Image (tube, grey):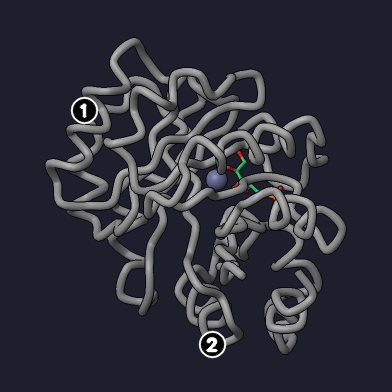
């Protein structure tokens, strides 16, 4: 069976302690570190620029997985690549030229991810499949951590796995991943699970972080 990777989203981490939070989640079993970049335009929230990504990069030994929820996205790809991202995901809905965007990501030498909102079908994915290393299926409407998992996306994941076949393309799930929902998407064919609130819950400055137990439970 497929090995499932857990990618904690630092959107739910302590914003005053990102270096320590990144080290703690990796020490306690995280496979990747997921960084949610929001622009207050494509999504109704604002988070991290490339300088923040560059600042946390030395605190991450493994994969820095950067999820760009920004439009336009093309002008910023080089900056996030230079900041040390290993995977850069852009949204299919972020503009009319997603194929060009994926080419631009590949041109940086980084892995290219295609993120799709809950309201987006997978028809277009067939025409982009040779451009991507990862497809991120949003299981909440992007913008905030701690939202409820949208169950209608599970069938979409199953269909997507069939479209991908045995190509080496990750299916990443983002939003509302918990002890209850993780098995559903894993069974449908996902292999990377982003989890924000489910990993960071119970953590606080000065307390021994319970992240390892939270990750193991997922
Ligand atoms: C949502 C972000 C997610 C989010 C996940 O817009 O892309 O990565 O932080 O948070 P949880 O796991 O709390 O739903
Ligand atoms: Zn995300």
Which residue is tagged 2? 27
Residue at image x 44%, y 29%?
91
Seen from this angle, which residue lies furthest right? 180
Image x and y of residue 205, in percent: 68, 78
**Snapshot quadrant of residue 199:** bottom right
Badge 2 or badge 1: first in the primary sequence: 2
In this image, 92 relative to 148: left or right?
Answer: left
Q: Measuring 76% from the left and 62% from the top, which residue is drawn there?
A: 198
Asked if residue 204 is positioned above or below residue 159 in the image, the reply reads below
Which residue is rendered at x = 62% and y = 65% of the image? 14
User: Label 1: few (<14), some or many (≥20) within 10 Å?
Assistant: few
Residue contact between numbered discs 2 and 1, judged by CB atoms under 8 Å: no
Q: What secondary structure is found at the residue carrying circle 2?
A: helix
Q: Position of residue 36 (x, y in %)?
A: 50, 46
Q: Which residue is mark 1?
A: 75
**Are there few (<14), some (14-19), or many (20+) residues within 10 Å of tag 2?**
few
- Spatial CA distance of label 2 from label 1 is 34 Å
Q: Quadrant of residue 65?
A: bottom left
Nearer to the camera, 200 or 15? 200
Identify the residue at the far top of this view. Answer: 96
């Amino acid at each position: 069976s497929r090995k499932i990777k857990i990618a904690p989203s630092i959107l739910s981490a302590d914003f005053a302690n990102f270096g320590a939070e990144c080290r703690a989640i990796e020490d306690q079993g995280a496979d990747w570190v997921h960084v949610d970049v929001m622009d207050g335009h494509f999504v109704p929230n604002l988070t991290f620029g490339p300088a923040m990504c560059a600042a946390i990069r030395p605190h991450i030994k493994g994969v820095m997985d950067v999820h760009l929820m920004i439009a336009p996205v093309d002008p910023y790809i080089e900056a996030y690549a230079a900041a040390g991202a290993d995977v850069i995901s852009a949204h299919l809905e972020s503009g009319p030229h997603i194929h060009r965007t994926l080419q631009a990501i590949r041109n940086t030498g980084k892995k290219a991810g295609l993120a799709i909102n809950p309201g987006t079908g997978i028809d277009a994915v067939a025409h982009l499949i040779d451009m991507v290393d990862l497809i991120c299926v949003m299981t909440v409407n992007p913008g905030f951590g701690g939202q409820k998992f949208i169950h209608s996306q599970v069938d979409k994941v199953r269909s997507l796995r069939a479209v991908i076949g045995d190509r080496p393309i990750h299916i990443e799930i983002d939003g509302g991943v918990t002890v209850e929902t993780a098995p559903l998407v894993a069974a449908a064919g996902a292999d990377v699970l982003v989890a924000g609130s489910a990993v960071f819950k119970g953590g606080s400055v000065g307390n021994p972080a319970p992240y390892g137990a939270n990750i193991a439970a997922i």
